[in-house]
Amino acid sequence: MYKETLSKDLGKLVRIESATTETAQSYVKFGTSFVFLAIVWFVASSFTSGFDDPTYVIAAGVIGGYMALNIGANDVANNVGPAVGAKSLTMMGAILIAIVCEASGALIAGGDVVTTISKGIIDASQLPNSNIFIPTMMSALLAAALWINIATWVGAPVSTTHSVVGGVMGAGIAAAGFGVVNWPVMGKIAASWVISPVMGGVVAALFLAFVKSKIIYQEDKLAGARRWVPILVALMAGVFSAYLCMKGLKRIWKPDPLIVTAMGVGMFIVAYAIMRPIIAHKSEGMENRNKSIRELFHIPLICAAALLSFAHGANDVANAVGPLAAIVDSASSGAVAGSKVGIPTWVLFVGAVGISIGLMLFGPKLIRTVGSQITRLNPMRAYCVALSAAITVIIATTLGLPVSSTHIAVGAVFGVGLYREWKTSGQTHINHGKFTKAKNPAKKAETRGLVTREKAMYRKLVRRQHLMTIAAAWLITVPLSALLAGGLLYLMQLLVI
């Protein structure tokens, strides 16, 4: 009795200690975030001292910093989550790689110019003057940041670009009416809600099916690995070189399609020549089992996570700070910003540093969701997800389809899990047939247990709760961001009046 009481008391103490530690960590995280935003306030004040009315720009700088924190907490998880889920990277290793590559992509390849009104969502010329334009962009930026914050809290990876698009659309309607919106462009974005995840999922499932057919289901798995793994790694090298040219470096260098193709083919040949002897040497002495094959995918997967992070930093960070750049341009010139504006260095730094801090403080939650809580990933499955994301973005960009890299990456994770469910379901039907044909009662009972276990595993391969939560978040991202932006602009105008 005494031991039971002591055990219960110790359990309570452990729970109290755990709760106290978690609370203290939360205070540290939020405290660090406020310190960062205070620094942004100081930086924005320093660089806008010559403006006629710097108040709006300083406030917009802080909102931009808040947006960057939320991008780091949510959007970056898609690039490194699969590598963490596959145990190719530790959480800390993934965060460090993402921080370095995201910041490098933003600062090195983020470019000097950004599209102001995210992909032509509204006609800025219909906004009468900068006194209307600046609050409109501030409302759009804050609404997008708030929605991404909410999505992170519920554990749903959402598209940064779509959040900004929704914010710009809603604030534009509140400022100048429905006629200000480019509705054909909005229709394409709505179509991408279906196109992006489906394309990513199908491509990832096809790659996983190929890997299983050519390597895993072969009697001599190592022979299959020696033949196909160098080709798969070389394919990744070629695809990612093209991906970086088309997406990661597009703001500082725009090569024509022939050069992009030549670079992709060249990298494929070089990578194959390098990887073939490496894989042959590494596979020597390995056991003929699936675990051995998985080890060959660790390094390619880490490289994929780094390259995806670099491209994301170069492409999406500039999109995210676009409204802030437009506000700075409009405040300095006194006119409505044009379709393209320059990005001040301090604005780019706010985006890069904010993303790094947001990832470090709040990123692990979404990294775990993408990497392990949707479906179980090993290095081969995670490799298929990463390769699918790059290939799908390249195909969509070539065809002019407006797709979201976030939707593609998460759709690829779902595609891998649903493909495995389909394969498991087929195996369950086979065993169920054996069960119905069995005459021995003991054999029937044994097979019944096998079928029950397989059905249980089938249900667990993709967690439906995450599927529904993420799908719902994707569907309401644009309309909810729009409503938030419109409401914020209305409140801002009331306060000014």
Image: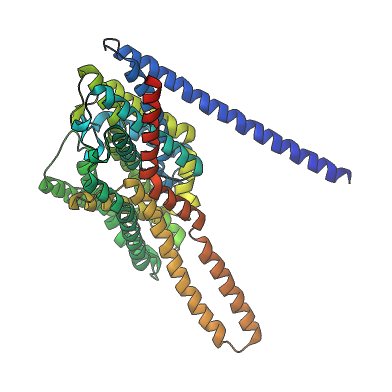
Where is residue 307? Give x, y as percent.
Answer: 31, 41
Q: Nearer the viewer, residue 471 or 215?
A: 471
Above or below, comparing residue 462 to residue 444 in the picture: above
The answer to whether residue 277 of the structure is visible from this angle is no
What is the residue that sits farthest to the right in this orientation? 1
Where is residue 418? Give x, y as percent.
Answer: 42, 62
Q: Residue at x 30, y 24 (%)?
A: 347
- Which quarter of the figure has residue 328? top left
Above or below, comparing residue 385 to residue 43 in the picture: below
Side of 280 relative to 126 (left or right): right
The answer to whether residue 159 of the structure is visible from this angle is yes
Q: Quadrant of the C terminus?
A: top left
What is the residue that sits farthest to the bottom in this orientation? 439
Where is residue 424? Give x, y as percent.
Answer: 47, 69
Side of 161 relative to 145 (left or right): left
- Which quarter of the figure has residue 81? top left
Q: Nearer the viewer, residue 120 or 496?
A: 496
The colour style of the image is rainbow
Q: Residue at x 33, y 61 (%)?
A: 202
Figure disc tally? 0
- Which quarter of the figure has residue 160? top left
Where is residue 469? Give x, y as percent.
Answer: 47, 51
Q: Nearer the viewer, residue 147 or 206?
A: 147
Q: Residue at x 38, y 14 (%)?
A: 42
